[in-house]
Image (tube, rainbow, N blue to C red):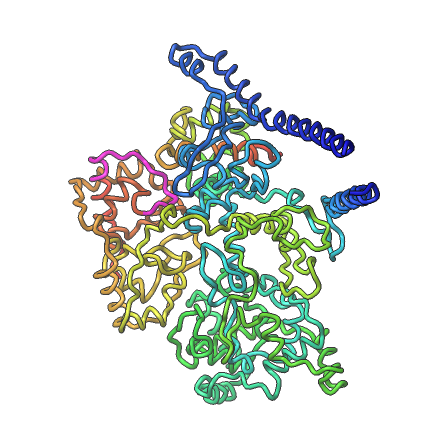
Amino acid sequence: MSRVGLTLLAVLLLLTVVAGAAAQGAGAAEVAGADQKILAFAALPEFKVPVGEIIYDRYCTFCHGDEGGGDGLNGFALTPGPADLRQVLARRSAREVADIIELGGVAVGKGQGMPSFRATIPAGKLALLQRYLREKIAAQK
Amino acid sequence: MANLRRYFFVFSILLALVSLVIIFQESSSAWKPYQLAYQAFLAQSARTPAEQAIAGKFVVGVRQDWLPPLNRADRCRSCHIGVDDPKAPAIPPIAAHPDLDQHPPRQFGCTICHGGEGYATRLPDAHQKIVPVRALEGSCAKCHQYGDLVAEAPTAGAGNKLIARYSCNGCHQFSDRGPKADSGPDLSGIGAKVSARWLAKWLLQPRDYLVQARMPDFLLTDPEILALTDFLVGKDATFRPNAAFFSDSAKGEEMLARLDDDGLDELVDQGKIIFGRLRCLTCHKLHGKGGDLAPELNRIALKSNRQWLGGWLQEPPRYDPQTIMPTFTLTRAERLAVVEYLWWESEVGDEGEVAELQGAQAKDGGAGPEKLEGRKLFVEKGCYNCHGLPGLEVKNDFAPSLADFGDKKISKIDFRKSGIPHTAQDYVAAKLQAPRLFGDNLKMPLFKLAPAEVGQIATVILGQSSKIPDALKRKNPAESLPLPLGEVGRLFAGYKCFSCHRIGANGGSLAPDLTMEGSKVKKEWLIAYLQKPSAIRPFLVERMPRFNMSPAEAELLADYIGMVLRSAKIDGTTPVMGEDPGAGRQLYFDKYQCQNCHTIGKEGGYFGPVLEAVGARLQPQWLWLRLENAHGLEPDSREPVLAISQPDRGLLLAFLQSLVGEKE
């Protein structure tokens, strides 16, 4: 091939590569161009429903309340009333909390009001419940 | 000639250099340093001779998990070497993976849940199209039925609820659920139900009428709205129910005309009582209180007319054969009372933009430069995918199938000039937030979803895949029992039991599962309950409506349930009843403190069912099994599983069976 031909070929190849690189759009975290800003997936707020929340809603809300304040709908039927979980989580160690859920209130010298959940909630889920308690309930002020 | 040799020599050297570079690149594996680090960790932390042997036998090399059912191999463990060692140091990528008991990587591989390129052994190839961690629960649906994992995959469960609510599977196909048959009401009789004014306003913005409207905003222009309104309810439109629907209206109007003001007030009061007795709020909402199965009734006077409502209440399937509303047995006077009550409660509203629309129509004589044809719009915009019309059946094939979205190559997704990052999850998120972003002539309407809802729906869509062979899928254990036929079938169809109850694999989940009801409850109690339902669980908002069933109907249903809906397990149980109900009472109150959650008489908690008449309601065999394991027969029960010894169970059973309530 002639020198001119080779040079032309090289330039053509170079242009192809450059064009290909330019065609990749730059990613943006938020995109304008619609009525409201469109959020990228990574920018979506927390949407995961924690498994611990499902368990808490099923077994615990009724006595301990939606926010764990001990003000659940069934609280009136119990003497002493259900515990304010925010205080329990602040006062007691993680091991004690695990024992209370697994073995009931009798594990820490309290009464029968809090039953044992060991046979009800499988071990793996107990850990998720505890995580939910730490993250959502204890985190409230 | 010499030039040629020179070129040849230069190119040969270049080729050799390039080859060396490639060989060097390919031979330095990305995974080696990780495996060496893990090996060092094993050697260091080995205490027992067994552990030392394991450390000694560790081979540095590619790890491949061959998955015969899927006909592929995953090499992820080459870098993620510590994934199934709970003691691995918590340093990615060699850290351990939590919760692997059900799905060990050597059997399942990793890509079945996480996506990515299983055969690759270096980044970035290995992590192409990897599912974002937040959306991981969507992958469960590849093998599991989506209804079975609500507790284990609650994010996907929330997404599925939204998909059912907004009827995405009305237009799109999914891999794990069929098309939605009854997304929107049948419009064959719409001309008699709504006014043109209401319909135009509704098409403009559904949420202005009904805050929890499921119908999205189709971004229709004014001429389009006018054309559609004209097509559906205009003076030439033919969508009206047949004459039988209004057969009662004339007599009803006569009755109303004979009432004076006091009479009308009394009628409204009566209507309120009947409304409460029927328990309409189990499904409908009124002033924010009530259930979610049916439309809110606050503004019914704005939407419809009394004659239509009277005809509807008489027998709903005459107007809409797909409706889930049961047929209540009411006299004409009772129907009139309910209608008057609802009209009294309803808002009456103002004119608003729609008057403008109507005015515009009158000015132009109903046409712009091009007369838009309503029927054509009805098809083009996709209305027929949710709403039925005579001659236009619901088709569910309007939009691209989502059944394989999880497997789709990124190169096949058209991002146009949207400027969003080129990943599947960003495409889905953007499409859900702004459907018309990717082109002006697209047809997907605008669902005003909250950002969290977008994430939950995206979770489900990203996991859609039909590549998994049927042999691997977990089947729903609920048997499909045959639907009742004949007289019983007519009762089931009339009262729409399946709208709320489940039997086998059919039915809804609002009310208890009746699959084993015949073995669970006593027949005499059931006959009385069907005619006059009482509150079994005090804290529930949703209650069984009172259908005004005749005793003969109640007995027929109870017979069917008692004979057909039985469980071999319950029937085959022999309870060992204790001798002393008094001792049982003591156990109830002192040892197990059941009164914390259950009520007898006036005292006790509200969490569980009232036990005052439990001996008349429940069969002893069922109670015996229940006391043994609260979750044995009903895994979703909220009662904790208590360890009750056999003798205690017998005494408790004796006590509970002695509680028969007051004889009426």
Q: Nearer the viewer, residue A90 or B89?
A: B89
Quarter-wise, where is residue B12 in the image?
top right
Q: Nearer the viewer, residue B460 or B51?
A: B51
Q: Is residue B268 visible?
A: no
Q: Is residue A36 magenta?
A: no
Locate residue A12, reporting x and y percent: 78, 46
Question: What residue do we see at 68% from left, 60% from top?
Answer: B436
Locate residue B63, reporting x and y percent: 47, 28
**Magenta part of the chain:** B634-650
Quarter-wise, where is residue B107 in the image?
top left
Residue found at the very far right of the displayed protein:
A4
Residue found at the very far front of the displayed protein:
B1
Quadrant location, the N terminus of chain A? top right
Q: Is residue B645 magenta?
A: yes
Q: Eyeballing the image, is B232 above or below A133?
A: below
Q: Eyeballing the image, is A140 above or below B242?
A: above
Locate residue B187, reporting x and y percent: 53, 76
Q: Is residue B217 left or right of residue B142?
A: right
- Examine the residues drawn in magenta and state their main secondary structure: loop
Q: Is residue B116 visible?
A: yes
Question: Total number of numbered labels?
Answer: 0
Q: Nearer the viewer, residue A101 or A112?
A: A101
Q: Is residue B189 left or right of residue A2?
A: left
Q: Nearer the viewer, residue B425 or B545?
A: B425
Q: Is residue B506 left or right of residue B264?
A: left
Question: What residue do we see at 18% from left, 46% from top?
Answer: B573
Q: Eyeballing the image, is B358 above or below B33?
A: below
Locate residue A141, reporting x and y percent: 62, 34
